[in-house]
Image: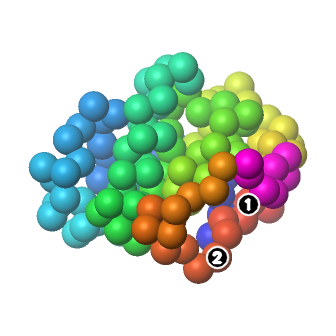
């Protein structure tokens, strides 16, 4: 799976969710979609990070979670840690910078309790 998406179109079957959507109220609908797209209307608005953690830890969502909107390359390590599988970078962001950002942190100071850890089998990869 590629972490950095190069196309702007949403994948087939994707559900686009606003960053103020009530995920718990829409849990059944969410589980029916293979891809969820969470929006960052501003790079300073971090609600989509919380949504991704909620989806992985509480709802045990196993599909792809994609970040879109004002996504900057330096956000990638935290996006990956929160459970995102793919990102669509803002148009002015460079792919080389994004790939470099993914290699910055291979370990974290804070641990995730086992009951909150996403059940993921493979780490996302950067698209060629």
**Whole-Å distance between the Cαs marked 1 and 2?**
15 Å
Q: What is the tally of numbered marks visible in this picture? A: 2
Residue of label 1 = 127
Asked if 61 appears above or below 17 in the picture, the reply is below
Residue visible at 66% across and 65% down in the picture: 124
Residue under circle 2?
Answer: 122
When asked about the image quadrant of residue 56, the answer is bottom left
Task: Specify start and end residues of the magenta stretch as a single range.
Answer: 103-109
Residue plotted at (81% across, 43% down) = 101
Q: Residue at x 40, y 61 (%)?
A: 57
- Examine the structure image and report whether residue 104 is included in the region drawn in magenta: yes
Residue 22, given in percent of the width and then of the height, sits at 20, 41
Is 73 above or below relative to 3?
A: above
**Mark closer to the chain start, 1 or 2:** 2
Q: Position of residue 96 (x, y in %)?
A: 86, 43
Q: Is residue 69 left or right of residue 57?
A: right
């Amino acid at each position: 799976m590629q972490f950095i998406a190069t196309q702007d179109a949403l994948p087939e079957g994707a559900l686009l969710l606003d960053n103020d959507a009530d995920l718990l109220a829409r849990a059944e609908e969410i589980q029916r979609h293979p891809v969820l797209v969470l929006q960052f209307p501003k790079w300073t608005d971090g609600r989509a990070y919380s949504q991704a953690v909620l989806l992985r830890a509480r709802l045990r969502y196993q599909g792809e979670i994609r970040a879109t909107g004002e996504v900057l390359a330096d956000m990638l390590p935290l996006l990956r840690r929160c459970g995102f599988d793919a990102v669509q970078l803002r148009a002015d962001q460079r792919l080389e910078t994004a790939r470099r950002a993914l290699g910055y942190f291979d370990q974290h100071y804070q641990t995730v309790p086992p009951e909150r850890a996403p059940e993921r089998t493979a780490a996302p990869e950067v698209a060629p």
